């Protein structure tokens, strides 16, 4: 079984991973997206973290000890993320990010129409 780790992609250990998981995500890819400033909203970041947890739950069977541990840790990770965001994130920040994303998209559409 695979765990929640920096890379889902240890495909030598879990060669069937991509047959089971249809939307792979790992912490290294999240780190790259952060470094490349690819997250324009909080919800986009949250979605990727939740995808890691959901993939761990989907891939790891609940009927063995290791699988149960991984599934439990995946659920804890999601819960921790949401509690951290609730405690630390300004209520208006997520809305501000979404407004900025929408304004950028509108400017892009406007430029396309001018061409």
Image: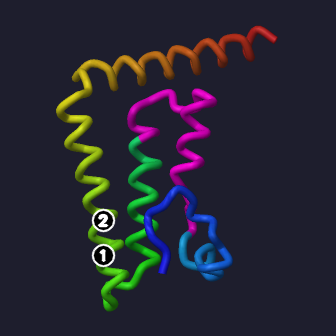
User: Is 70 rendered above or below residue 15?
Assistant: above
Q: Quadrant of residue 88?
A: top left
Q: Residue at image x 55%, y 78%? A: 20
Rounded to the nearest whole Å, what is the CA distance between mark 2 and mark 1? 6 Å
In this figure, which residue is indicated by the disc labeled 2?
73
Give the magenta range.
22-45
Decide whether residue 63 is among the magenta residues. no
The residue carrying pointer 2 sits among few (fewer than 14), some (14 to 19) or many (20 or more) residues within 10 Å by Cα, namely some
Residue 68: x percent and y percent?
A: 30, 80
Quarter holding the C terminus is top right
Q: Residue lying farthest top?
A: 114
Asked whether 87 or 95 is in front, the reply is 87
Asked if residue 61 is positioned above or below residue 83 in the image, the reply reads below
Which residue is at a point 62% across and 73% down the rendered structure image? 18
Q: Secondary structure at mark 2?
A: helix
Total numbered badges shown on the rendered structure? 2
Query: Would you say 7 lies left or right of 41 here?
Result: right
Secondary element at image label 1:
helix
Given residues 22 and 57, the one toward you in this image is 57
**Position of residue 101 measured from the top left corner of the image (x, y, whole percent):** 50, 22
Left or right, 4 with respect to 107, comes to left
Instruction: Determine contact: label 2, label 1, CB under 8 Å.
Output: yes
Residue identified by numbered label 1: 69
């Amino acid at each position: 079984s695979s765990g929640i780790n920096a890379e889902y992609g240890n495909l030598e250990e879990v060669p069937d991973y991509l047959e089971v998981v249809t939307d792979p995500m790992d912490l290294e890819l999240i780190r790259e997206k952060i470094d490349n400033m690819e997250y324009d909203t909080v919800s986009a970041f949250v979605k990727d973290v939740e995808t890691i947890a959901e993939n761990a739950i989907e891939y790891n069977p609940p009927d063995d000890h290791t699988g149960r541990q991984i599934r439990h840790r995946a659920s804890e990770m999601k819960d921790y993320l949401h509690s951290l965001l609730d405690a630390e994130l300004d209520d208006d920040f997520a809305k501000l990010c979404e407004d900025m994303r929408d304004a950028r998209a509108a400017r892009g559409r406007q430029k396309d129409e001018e061409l």
